[in-house]
Image (cartoon, grey):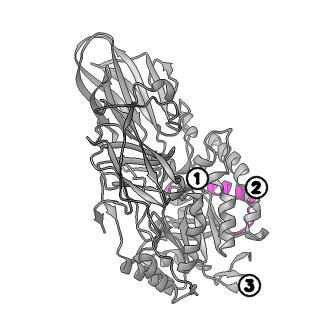
Amino acid sequence: MPVLQITDEGFRLDDEPFRIISGGLHYFRVHPSHWADRLRKARLMGLNTVETYVPWNLHQPRPDEFRLDGGLDLPAFLDLAAAEGLHVLLRPGPYICAEWEGGGLPSWLLADPDILLRSQDPRYLAAVDAYFERLLPPLSRHLATNGGPVIAVQVENEYGAHDGDPAHLVHLAELLRRCGVDVPLFTCDQPADLARGSLPGVLATANFGSRSTQGLAALRAHRPNGPLMCTEFWIGWFDRWGGRHVVRDPAQAAEELDTLLSTGASVNLYMFHGGTSFGFTNGANDKHTYRPTVGSYDYDAPLDEAGDPTAKYQAFRQVIAKYAPVPAEPVPARAARTGSAAVPLTTSAPLLANLPTLGEAVHAERPLTMEQLGQDFGFVLYRTTLPNPGPALLEVGAVHDRAQVFVDGQPIGVLERESHERSLAFTVPRAGAVLSVLVENQGRVNYGPGMHDRKGLLGLVLLDGTELTGWSSLPLPLTSLDGLAFAETATAPVGPTFHRGTVRIDEVADTFVHLPGWTKGNVWINGFHLGRHWSRGPQRSLYVPGPVLHPGSNEITVLELHAAHRALTVELRETPDLGPTEE
């Protein structure tokens, strides 16, 4: 493919003036069997480019492990983009934000107690260097200079809002070049942070979702010459647990896009197709109060979570057609769905009775964090014994992020980081009673100073003012549910429990799991971890990609942490429920 050129007048491609009309499409949030479909729909809306981040924490889950396969086969995704005739903006981070767990930074970095992320800390730089030296060489053939679709690569991500240390950006830019990236580099920042987050000789771009004229004016004031581009044109937003589903009027969003394109600027829609943060991969924000993000990344995007065109798709297509050629092919209709099935979950496996199959405890005087345990996602079960019977006050230094507390297996309360809760009063029934604390990582903070977000019980744990010692810390990543002892039960057991059932599907297609009457936990289908459910909302359904299903019997497993629906049933429906809306 032709190479992108940056001139004082703007972009050129194949020695012709060129405008980037791009949309965000994260391969790691889309089932790989759907990549080609989503890319085709991007082209049909009139996009000539797609943008993707690269999640370090999935590609390198441990320092000695590197993955570039399955749903992380970035080279395959780039090949499909090229086959569709699309260019690619690659945003490898190492920090990506993206409402993704830890902003994409792997949790094992935090095993070092005083490491400084996104800085010139030599320990952080050594890890970044080693990662890029593994990630980038396999992508070399996909660079436009070698005939591939990648026309530009981003340096870090909104760094001006974090620190603005030019030495760090220089290091990353030089690292990209050293690893063979010879296409143009760019930075992106919100207008107020442009001076702190940009580099001489590197294209600077801006991020905004409205007031395009002002945003572009700030960019032009910062860079008097060269292309104008909005790298994140926010056409929707993400949702958090306990909030409302955020939507944006299609006509208003299209009008803003029209205003931006009328200036001659280039654009990347954030997002074109949001997809899903499957499993435990959602991030969180913490601006003095911790706010975990939901698993759906629908983002009120032109393609919804299941990949269907929305009213916003049609409105944007009409706007883009005023400024660039749009394919004459018809827009694909809504895909078929599997639904209208109530699924009884007929067997159960209490979590506390199945601990030996789920992990191995580590013993220490104090509770160990997930990072000390070498654990990324999931839960940790902490246990110790209580010395004396009678009334007691439990106090913890901090809970990251949500703790269910049990005495001799009976639930006595919940402590939530989001509510700033750190203490619990209860009665100890006997000397030597077992205190169990099940702590859930609800998503590491992905933006701002709270990113050094270690998980578990942090600090001292006190009982009536005296430190409790002699703890076991059992990591429960739940990467495999093999070996759980399921049995038929007439009533749901007390405490966290796995419930399992099967559903027969004759014609496989995408669907949505709804859990009316359930409280909080996680859902798997055929071993594929869909994500979290929580009655707090707004999200009340989980998207199921058709490729994880198969004709015939399909197994559904629900971990319910609190109270299950009395009938122990879930439902497959053709449509999602992302909750009440907020515009």
Q: Residue at x 29, y 9 (%)?
A: 431
- Check disc 1 and give the amino acid type: Pro
Q: Dot 1 corresponds to which residue?
A: 55
- Return the x and y of residue 580 as percentages of the image width and height: 28, 62
Circle 1 sits in a helix, a strand or a loop, which is it? loop
- Which mark is first along the chain, 2 or 3? 3
Position of the N terminus, as image quadrant, is bottom right
Q: How many marks?
A: 3
Query: Which amino acid type is marked by label 2?
Result: Pro
For discs 3 and 1, the disc positioned in front in the rendered view: 1
Above or below — where is 187 with respect to 106?
below
Q: Residues within 10 Å of mark 2 (few under 14, many from 20)?
A: few
Disc 1 crowd rating (10 Å Cα; few below 14, some 14-19, many 20+) is many
Query: Is 469 left or right of 42, judged from the image as shown?
Result: left
User: Could you tell me residue 374's position as x and y percent?
Assistant: 56, 33
User: Can residue 443 be seen at all in this image of the molecule?
Assistant: no
Q: Measured along the vertical axis of the image, is residue 583 above or below residue 8?
A: above
Dot 2 corresponds to which residue?
137
Q: Which residues are magenta?
A: 162-184
Q: Which residue is mark 3?
A: 15
Residue 386 placement (x, y as % from top left) = 32, 15
